[in-house]
Image: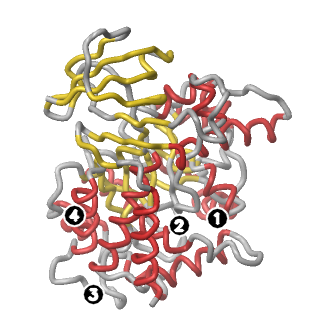
Amino acid sequence: MTSYLLEKAWVDGAVRDTVRVEIEDGVFTSVEVDATRTATPLRGLTLPGFANTHSHAFHRALRGRTQRGSGTFWTWREQMYAAAARLDPDTCFELARATYAEMLAAGYTSVCEFHYVHHQPDGTPYDDPNALGHALVAAAETTGIRLTLVDTCYLAGGIGEPLAGPQRRFADRDADAWAERVAAIRHDDVGGAIHSVRAVPREAMPTLVAATEGKPLHAHVSEQTAENEACLAAYGLTPVELLAEAGALGPRTTAVHATHLTQADISLLAETGTGVSLCPTTERDLGDGIGPARALADAGVPITIGSDSQAVVDPFEELRAWEMDERLASTSRGRFVAADLLARTAGRIAVGEPGDLVTLDLTTPRTAGTGADEHTAVFAATAADVTHVVASGRVVFDGDHARIGRALAAAVGRLWS
């Protein structure tokens, strides 16, 4: 059993003073507000850990490279393919380990890894067909982040188009072969993904839905207007409608991005209890557009955040971008209040919940004088203000951001060398 005395902590929807917590077997067993008993002190504002619901760890190698010059999502994709072509199990492990450490240092204590690079460059499976997936699992275990490995099915180069170039690394023979491979992954928390309506044909989708019954199911959805147009031209349906037809929507499903939705799409997501993972720092970096966050929330759709391409790894910036993008799109402020954003994206400091603690320094140039409450977290703090992180009761970050940077430099340098 480990105990901490939190100077200030976000508990039950408000910042409380002098909160004593006990963690045993990875979960909170006691939470006491206005505590008088002593424990290991954590000075600053402590929040529950954030959930990162959409990540491509190897994209971290693209930061600072794909932002040069002009282009579109589609030109960015070619640069991403170049990075994917360089991955092997060793570089995948090293890069994921450094990226997951960066996530922990930023305040993410769990991650859904949307894993789609599976095989050797020519498409031949490794001796262990899940060598790259197991490298991700090992990286998560080493760093202490809780991982849901969302293994991704990728069968086509586009609607009605063959696979080309690096895409061969992504693809299994067919949906049944994908399901057979995924069943052999050695990890306790494995889900599946329909990469997109571009990469998984209509007739293959029901196989994926059946293979992931009772498990998480994710899909990139309506990230680009071109994707919507191609889907309508081929099937006479929007991507959301196509997924609904396949039985892919529901409470276990997360639609990633969901940027260009119709009102009928939003209603379908709400009626089925399907969640949406917004990735605003990636969506703005790629020029994808601004998703309908307020309309989704008003319809009752659960919304979370993801770091996606790792252009930024910072849950505070994701929340800030979520609200600021809404302001730009609506010309109105206060579309989401800070407490609502935290409630949607972070865990809870409560008995029975995972023992996750993220502590912010309240004396930095960014946070000083900002009120030391939820508004400090959402509208002032950055990942650089995180001083201490506990995940499932384990100290996973001690405030040494420079150490995280050195590991990232080594891992990214190795990939590109």
Applied colour scheme: secondary structure
Q: Tell me which numbered mark, 1 or 2, is placed earlier along the sequence.
A: 2
Residue 271 place in picture, x, y as percent: 50, 28
Which three-letter amino acid code belongs to the residue tagged 4?
Answer: Ala
User: Can you give x and y, in whole percent of width and height, for residue 153 in the image?
Assistant: 36, 65
Q: Is residue 3 left or right of residue 63?
A: left
Which mark is nearer the camera, 4 or 1? Answer: 4
Q: Amino acid at mark 1?
A: Ala
Residue drawn at x 23%, y 59% as measured from the top left: 142
Q: Secondary structure at mark 2?
A: loop
Dot 3 lies on which element? loop
Circle nearer the N terminus (3, 2): 3
* Amino acid type, label 3: Thr
Total marks drawn?
4
Residue under label 1: 230
Looking at the image, do the residues carrying marks 1 and 2 touch, with CB atoms under 8 Å apart?
yes
Discs 3/1, front:
3
Q: Nearer the viewer, residue 416 or 124?
A: 416
- Location of the C terminus (image quadrant): bottom left
State left or right for residue 287 relative to residue 40. right
The Cα–Cα distance between marks 4 and 1, rounded to whole angstroms, is 38 Å
Residue at far right of view? 331
